Amino acid sequence: MQELPELDIYRTFIAEHFAGAQITGIEITNAKIFQASDEQIQRDVVGKVVWFVERRGLYLVVHLDNGKRLLLHLGQGAYLYKGSEADKPSRAAQLKLIFGEAVLYGVGLRADDLQLLTVKENEEKLGKLGPDALDKRLTLERFIGRFAKKRGAIKTALMDQNVISGIGAAYSDEICFAAGIRPDAKIPMFEHETWERLYGAMHNVVREAISNGGAGEHAFSAEDSHTGKHRDQFQVYDREGQMCRSCEGVIEKIDVSGRKAFVCSNCQKDQ
Ligand SMILES: [Zn+2]
């Protein structure tokens, strides 16, 4: 799983290791994951310097010194690894972004997970995303406003990247638990106080996950021992049948609009 906290940790790692570094080569084992021509790659990627890296919702955007952007998406099971020719990730990588001796490997990538875009194309692609869950301009009132047209379950809306961006399957469950609200609770039932709890829970859950190293299953490099420490801190996500850490209840797995969700029916209510 790669949601806001995991991607934010990647952003920090990439900035630390590759900001200011020159891309000396790129190797793709499956042409579908990066549909740029050899000519474009030679002209716009190879020889260019990474200016900085930002996270937009569930995307990483690598800014190159020629003004172009490399937009990276990590789907289910995908991860990044910083190594070298001698220090490779355990699984076969589809992407090798080479920086002299250092290599940034991309594993588990699928079609179009890496795109070479102009600033305009990048904005067209990401401009319709909702505000980032950690965006400072996302006040409580604006947060509530984002859900104004939503009638369904809160989990589904939290995962809708056009409402708020950055939250996926795992952290939506964790946020609902922290707020004491069922993931299948219906939005029209919420009172102002319910939103206050959700808003506070979203910030606390996401920030805590980042400071714990997120829940990623693969270290970023041989030296990285921090990544994934948050996995043991999940209160409900993927804990079906286990005891709730706040009460005597047992965590259940339920279906919310076709997606699995994890809930403690004792701790979480409809509003
Ligand atoms: Zn409980």
Image (spheres, rainbow, N blue to C red):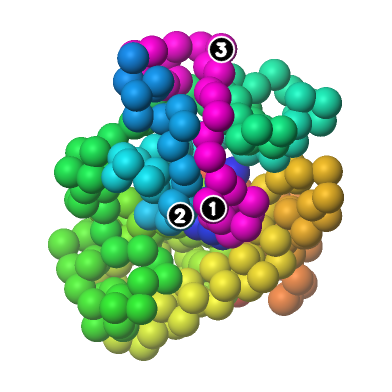
Label 3 beta carbon less than 8 Å to ligand 1: no
Q: Where is residue 173 shown, x and y percent of the image?
A: 53, 59
Query: Can I make out residue 217 in this image?
Result: no
Label 2 beta carbon less than 8 Å to ligand 1: no
The residue pinned by badge 2 equals 52
Q: Where is residue 22 shown, x and y percent of the image?
A: 53, 40
Tell me which amino acid carries mark 2: Phe
Q: Label 1's element?
A: loop
Q: CA distance from mark 1 to mark 3?
A: 25 Å
Q: Label 2's element?
A: strand
Point out the stretch of residues depicted in magenta. Answer: 11-38
Neighbourhood count class around disc 1 (C-alpha, 10 Å): few under 14, some 14–19, many 20 upward: some
Dot in front, 1 or 3? 1
Task: Confirm or deny contact between disc 1 and disc 2 (CB under 8 A).
Answer: yes
Q: CA distance from mark 2 to mark 3?
A: 26 Å
The residue pinned by badge 3 equals 29
Tell me which amino acid carries mark 1: Ala
Q: Where is residue 111 shown, x and y percent of the image?
A: 42, 20
In the depicted structure, whether residue 136 falls above or below residue 264: below
Residue 171 found in image quarter = bottom right
Q: How many marks?
A: 3
Neighbourhood count class around disc 2 (C-alpha, 10 Å): few under 14, some 14–19, many 20 upward: some
Q: Quadrant of the C terminus?
A: bottom left
The residue pinned by badge 1 equals 19
Tell me which amino acid carries mark 3: Thr
Of mark 1 and mark 3, the one earlier in the sequence is 1
Residue at the spot 36% in from the left edge and 63% down from the top edge: 132
Q: Where is residue 161 shown, x and y percent of the image?
A: 32, 51
Of mark 2 and mark 3, the one earlier in the sequence is 3
